[in-house]
């Protein structure tokens, strides 16, 4: 194995355990001092589920002043980040509680709340993020995005296109993984977010920038997903499976933070911008069509992924060739259909989808992909994805 040059940036501190949210007050005190003003960034669903109240109670028992910002929506708009940043001014700490959207809003709002520029100023790394910001604590209520361990925040620009910001300033000081917070997640959401974690891990292990540290995180995540995702989907109250999936998502986040992602994410982001497809579902179906070509182009890396998924065999090329079918079978077992017909998408939309995958914000993912791809190749993948071929 040839090791590409890399620099390991370290990882977010992670605290794991069922009921761990009850220690949130002490966590904040350690980071921001006693009786701190704390902004909790979340979404209406988390509030309705009573999870925001649990976080607020834990903070107030410790003497902190908890302020709730609950205006986050899926595929968060840049305006919501600016609103959260305004609410964060003067806060000693910012907590992101929820799925990837809430955590991404919290991260970027915390990073820019002391500056005089809106969040859009920092999109696509056009300008460096401010250096000083309140410490960030992230508490995921799903197990998929891995945002709690990445230095990236994804959001929708004013025109609806998916954008991102990146930098060390977006790294959380602490990620709190409490599997009990994910126990109420419906099966479909569990499947989509779990598939997101799996795609993160597979791409991080196989893209052109993959290296041993990213691979260590990614392969560990794949093993956990392969063992526990179906259980989590079928038995939502199985805290062992839920906890394993939370750890897998965080490990996969560490992996993509090191190595990045490939064309599955370019297609997935394009689908999100183009048709508002759930991110986990979108990238899962993107990898489904990309995996055969990728595995043929990089058999050794994909054979390692296959072994992590439980496939046996000594020959790398044979193992890699079996991986796409095993991946497809897992998606079907957790209820992720390859068809997008429910959204009114068809093969005729392939040219528009391929064009969106080539937008500047998505092109780096195409470039990093395990297999070199021409524009015609990306269009063919887009067509296969939209056809939902069996």
Image (cartoon, rainbow, N blue to C red):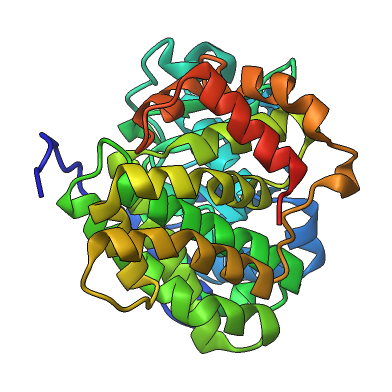
In terms of image quadrants, where is residue 347? Answer: top right
x then y, percent, for residue 124: 47, 18
x then y, percent, for residue 6: 14, 36
At 50% across and 68% down in the image, what residue appears? Answer: 326
At 42% across and 67% down in the image, what residue appears? Answer: 248
User: Left or right: where does residue 33 sit relative to residue 138?
Assistant: left
Residue 265 seen in render: yes
User: Left or right: where does residue 4 sit relative to residue 239?
Assistant: left
Q: Nearer the viewer, residue 52 or 299?
A: 299
In terms of image quadrants, where is residue 144? Answer: bottom right
User: Left or right: where does residue 246 sit relative to residue 235?
Assistant: left
Residue 14 seen in render: no
At 39% across and 57% down in the image, what residue appears? Answer: 252
Q: Nearer the viewer, residue 283 or 20?
A: 283
x then y, percent, for residue 344: 90, 39
User: Left or right: where does residue 62 sit relative to residue 127?
Assistant: right
x then y, percent, for residue 19: 52, 82
- In this picture, is 29 found above or below 326? above
Which quadrant: the C terminus? bottom right
């Amino acid at each position: 194995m040839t090791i590409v040059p890399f620099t390991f940036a370290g990882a977010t501190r992670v605290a794991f355990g069922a009921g761990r949210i009850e220690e949130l007050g002490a966590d904040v005190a350690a980071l921001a001092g006693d009786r701190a003003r704390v902004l909790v960034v979340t979404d209406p669903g988390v509030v309705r589920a009573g999870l925001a109240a649990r976080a607020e109670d834990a903070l107030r028992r410790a003497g902190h002043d908890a302020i709730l910002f609950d205006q986050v929506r899926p595929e968060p708009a840049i305006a919501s980040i600016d609103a959260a940043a305004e609410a964060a001014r003067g806060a000693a700490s910012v907590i992101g509680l929820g799925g990837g959207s809430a955590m991404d809003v919290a991260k970027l709002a915390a990073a820019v709340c002391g500056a005089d520029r809106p969040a859009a100023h920092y999109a696509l790394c056009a300008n460096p993020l401010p250096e000083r910001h309140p410490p960030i604590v992230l508490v995921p209520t799903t197990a998929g995005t891995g945002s709690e361990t990445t230095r990236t925040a994804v959001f929708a620009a004013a025109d609806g296109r998916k954008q991102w910001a990146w930098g060390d300033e977006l790294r959380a000081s602490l990620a709190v993984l409490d599997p009990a917070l994910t126990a109420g997640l419906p099966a479909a959401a569990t499947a989509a977010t779990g598939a997101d974690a799996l795609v993160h891990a597979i791409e991080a292990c196989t893209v052109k920038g993959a290296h041993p540290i990213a691979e260590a995180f990614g392969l560990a995540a794949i093993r956990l997903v392969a063992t526990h995702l179906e259980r989590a989907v079928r038995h939502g109250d199985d805290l062992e499976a839920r906890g394993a999936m939370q750890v897998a998502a965080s490990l996969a986040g560490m992996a993509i933070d090191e190595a990045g992602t490939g064309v599955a994410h370019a297609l997935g982001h394009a689908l999100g911008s183009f048709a508002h497809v759930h991110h986990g579902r979108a990238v899962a179906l993107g990898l489904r069509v990309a995996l055969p070509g990728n595995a043929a182009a990089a058999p050794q890396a994909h054979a390692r992924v296959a072994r992590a998924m439980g496939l046996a065999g000594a020959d790398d090329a044979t193992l890699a060739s079996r991986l796409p079918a095993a991946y497809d079978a897992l998606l079907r077992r957790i209820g992720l259909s390859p068809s997008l017909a429910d959204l009114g998408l068809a093969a005729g939309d392939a040219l528009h989808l391929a064009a969106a995958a080539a937008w500047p914000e998505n092109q780096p993912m195409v470039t990093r992909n395990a297999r070199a791809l021409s524009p015609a190749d990306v269009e063919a993948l887009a067509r296969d994805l939209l056809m939902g071929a069996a």
